[in-house]
Amino acid sequence: MTIVLRLDDLTVFVRTADHGSLSSAARELEISPALASAAVKRLEGVLKLRLFARTTRSLRLTEEGEHYLRHAREALRLLKEGHDTLVQGKETLGGTLKISMPSDLGRNMVVGWLDQFQAQYPKVNLQLSISDSVSDMYRKPVDIAIRYGRQEDSSLIALPLAPDNRRVLVASPDYIRQHGRLSALEDLLHHHCLRFMLDEVIHDRWSFYQDARGDPTVVHVNGNRACDDADVVRRWAVAGLGIAYKSRLDVSADIRAGRLEVLLPDMTGEPTPLNMVCMHRTQITPTVLQLRDFLRAQCEKA
């Protein structure tokens, strides 16, 4: 059974025990004696314990109350310690972070998220590199790389941001009206597929799954456009120039706004986890951890 305790009730109980008086505790906490009495009664009701023995002239802890007081003090101490740590962290987080990120997600989402992060932690300085080329962290002066895909280099440390992210097939409503909606993967062979290109290699083999654990079905797609900038591929799709196979994070805002529609939603797309990558553990500073938590929360809301 879950017990839900109110912080203010615990505080009233501890102060009442300290002073031996509800009215004295109420004065210290700047509340009425009636509110203080109600807080203690509510706590006793939740705990199903009698914490104080009351008479018309005195108030003393019961044996159960004395035992519980130790736990209540410790709980309040830990909560205060946690609050102080957060406040201190907010005041001390800072330094320069050199961050690389992919073009589409970087330009259209992460840059805005980093604006919010920097507004909360103004002592943090940012140096951003936005490119779909995978940066060599051993040669390029980068502290953090935000990357899609499974981490192949075991010497690097990956902090997950969106571990369950996958690709989705998308096209604009105009394209669907003009060329028809897909009914099967084989229909992709008869459509303009907007392909991403990296290191002069065109990614024209798109993998799909009937479920998350089965073997993939690979479709060799064709089209009249390819680009080494994923943001351009997304813009082509929004403009109605073909079908794109994109990270869901990249197109989430377009889907919500109706600029793009998901095709074959029953098919499971290729896994595209998003990670924040560092070279070694000494780089995982409190600032980096706070940024990780912040970006992970933004990804969950996207």
Image: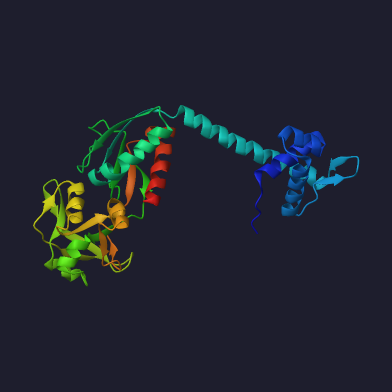
In the rendered image, residue 214, in percent from the top left (x then y), is placed at 30, 67
Q: Is residue 284 visible?
A: no
User: In the visual, does 2 lie left or right of 279?
Assistant: right
Q: Is residue 146 left or right of residue 14?
A: left
Q: Residue furthest left?
A: 224
On the image, which quarter does residue 276 sit in?
A: top left
**Front residue (pair 145, 84):** 84
Q: Let me know if residue 90 appears in the view.
A: yes
Q: Is residue 47 above or below residue 14?
A: below
Residue placed most toward the observer, 288 or 153: 288
Q: Which quadrant holds the N terminus?
A: bottom right
Q: Residue at x 22, y 42 (%)?
A: 134
Q: Give how far across and how far down residue 180 sits, in percent.
A: 18, 69
Give the x, y percent position of residue 11. Answer: 70, 40
Residue 160 placement (x, y as % from top left): 37, 47
**Which residue is rendered at x = 15% and y = 67% of the image?**
179
**Closest to the observer, 283 or 85:** 85
Q: Is residue 229 left or right of residue 81?
A: left
Vertical arrangement, residue 108 with respect to residue 204, above or below = above
Give the residue at x 17% y 48%.
Answer: 232
Q: Give the quarter of the image for residue 164.
A: bottom left
